[in-house]
């Protein structure tokens, strides 16, 4: 039971810390390419947790990032929406018989297409909300939505890379 | 009642989401345009402390650059001082001691006193629509809210929130703010705004068609806003056009400060009697 929570918690902590210490400073192309490393811990949460857990984890993440980066609530609002949609997105791509208890999003066990879609949707929801709220005026919305797309792409590629490099091979059950 | 309770219990995640999202959006709307208050001060302390750590490491690599910059600034200041003294000496046909014998009265000095506090930039954003800068000086260093901030002698922003050790500044590149600006030294007053797209360029609004404009013309502060005295450069005209049947130019300006490179700034605060706002308050 301890391992059930310990590994995701450690991953979440590492991702948030890395974002605050390093990734928040890495923005390229006048803000067009902005990696959101802190989402990695949320995207990789086990697939069978209670919906409330995703919401609380996402809200906490957004709140911490807002405090650390002077985001003024933008990250909290975007992360909360992502956290609420998280179980719905899991259900959208779930196999007919559902996921095994404690199953984690893993490229080897669930397939490249599943992993790519799951990750892209969650990151996309977060970035679209973040950039839409950040634009603050209708005139900036198209540009900011385009920025959301590029940042989603960058974060998605980053997560796939990290997953391929560091995720332990899936265990056979 | 029991049914209602069961309904709430069944949808508790959704309800919590709605409540938390509304609170978060409230935070966004309260802090997006003009960030002030408890949460901002808390974030300022957190962000400032971490920024100070990062800056310490970065400073090691920047020392040689900083020295060169300080030397250049010293040289420029000395040149100005010498030119000033030389000009006065010629005019009064006296030596530099005699120049200092034209004292300005205490009342006038107090009325026009401008406090200048140097500060380093700990954290800066230039890729958002609502950008912020965090400085390493705060209320204990005498920095006050609503002070102006200049970089290399050019206007760059205004102080909005001050914690004990850190200061939050909104720069010219902030879509929710407008700045009073004058075209050339004696030209008309206009509004300087930023459209949120390019951190190097802003837009000058309300420049009447009667104005004689040229690329390269300097845009200055007017002194009408409380935080800056008049005559501080803000930007230069980079292009302009007069739309058909319009009474005003569309002017694009290049900001004088490079917001992507700023490391050192000065926070200026005018003496209380010198503010235009207080003069206008005294009008009948």
Image: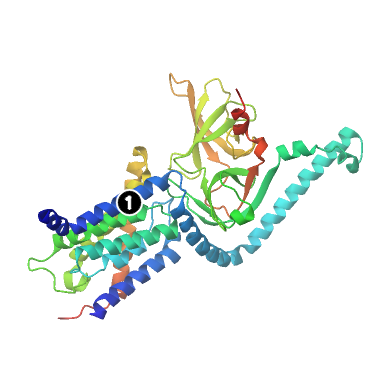
In the picture of the structure, the residue carrying the numbered disc 1 is: B23
Q: Residue furthest front?
A: B1
> What coloring was used for the rendering?
rainbow
From the viewer's perspective, is B66 left or right of B238?
Answer: right
Residue B80 sits in which quadrant?
top right
Residue B180 sits in which quadrant?
top right
Residue B237 sits in which quadrant?
top right
- Residue A22 visible? The answer is no
From the viewer's perspective, is A97 left or right of B35?
Answer: left
Q: Nearer the viewer, residue A139 or A129?
A: A129
Above or below for B173 versus B282 = below
Q: Residue at x 44, y 24 (%)?
A: B243
Q: Quadrant of the C terminus of chain B?
A: top right
Q: Residue at x 34, y 47 (%)?
A: A133
Q: Residues within 10 Å of mark 1 (few under 14, many from 20)?
A: some
From the viewer's perspective, is B16 left or right of B140?
Answer: left
Is disc 1 placed on a helix, strand or loop?
helix
Q: Horizontal and vertical percent for residue B198?
A: 46, 43
From the viewer's perspective, is B36 left or right of A63?
Answer: right
Q: Residue at x 80, y 37 (%)?
A: B105
- Residue B62 visible? The answer is yes
Q: Chain of mark 1?
A: B
- How many numbered markers are drawn? 1
Above or below for A140 versus A157 = above
Q: Horizontal and vertical percent for residue B39?
A: 44, 55
Q: Horizontal and vertical percent for residue B211?
A: 57, 23
Q: Horizontal and vertical percent for residue B208?
A: 52, 23
Q: Nearer the viewer, residue A9 or B104?
A: B104
Q: Residue furthest left?
A: A96
């Amino acid at each position: 039971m301890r391992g059930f929570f310990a590994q995701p918690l450690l991953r979440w902590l590492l991702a948030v810390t890395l974002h605050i210490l390093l990734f928040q400073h890495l923005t390229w192309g006048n803000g067009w390419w902005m990696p959101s490393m802190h989402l990695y811990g949320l995207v990789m949460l086990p697939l069978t947790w209670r919906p409330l857990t995703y919401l609380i984890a996402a809200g906490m993440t957004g709140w911490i990032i807002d405090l650390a980066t002077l985001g003024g609530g933008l990250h909290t609002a975007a992360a909360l929406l992502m956290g609420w949609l998280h179980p719905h997105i899991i259900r959208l791509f779930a196999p007919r018989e559902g996921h095994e208890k404690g199953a984690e999003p893993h490229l080897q066990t669930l397939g490249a297409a599943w992993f790519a879609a799951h990750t892209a949707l969650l990151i996309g929801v977060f970035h679209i909300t973040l950039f839409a709220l950040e634009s603050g005026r209708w005139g900036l919305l198209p540009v900011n939505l385009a920025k959301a797309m590029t940042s989603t792409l960058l974060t998605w590629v980053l997560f796939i890379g990290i997953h391929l490099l560091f995720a332990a091979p899936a265990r056979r059950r | 009642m029991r049914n209602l309770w069961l309904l709430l219990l069944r949808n508790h995640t959704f309800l919590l989401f709605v409540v938390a999202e509304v609170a978060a959006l409230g935070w966004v709307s309260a802090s997006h345009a003009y960030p002030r208050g408890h949460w901002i001060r808390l974030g300022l302390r957190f962000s400032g402390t971490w920024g100070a750590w990062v800056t310490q490491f970065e400073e090691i690599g920047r020392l040689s650059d900083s020295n060169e910059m300080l030397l250049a600034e010293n040289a420029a200041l000395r040149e100005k001082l010498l030119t000033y003294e030389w000009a006065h000496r010629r005019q009064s046909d006296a030596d530099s001691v005699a120049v200092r014998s034209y004292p300005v009265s205490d009342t006038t000095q107090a009325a026009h006193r401008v406090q200048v506090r140097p500060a380093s930039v700990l954290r800066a954003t230039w890729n958002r629509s609502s950008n912020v800068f965090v400085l390493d000086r705060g209320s204990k260093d005498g920095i006050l809210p609503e002070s102006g901030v200049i970089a290399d002698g050019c206007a760059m922003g205004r102080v909005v929130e001050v914690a004990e050790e850190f200061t939050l500044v909104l720069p010219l590149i902030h879509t929710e703010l407008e700045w009073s600006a004058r075209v050339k030294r004696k030209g008309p007053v206009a509004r300087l705004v930023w459209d949120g797209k390019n951190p190097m360029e802003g837009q000058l609004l309300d420049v009447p068609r009667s104005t004689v404009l040229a690329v390269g013309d300097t845009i200055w502060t007017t002194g009408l806003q409380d935080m800056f005295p008049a005559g501080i450069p803000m930007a230069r005209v980079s292009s302009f056009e007069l739309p058909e049947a319009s009474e005003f130019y569309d002017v694009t300006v290049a900001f004088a400060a490079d917001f992507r490179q700023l490391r050192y700034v000065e926070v200026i605060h005018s003496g209380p009697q010198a503010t235009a706002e207080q003069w206008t308050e005294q009008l009948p």
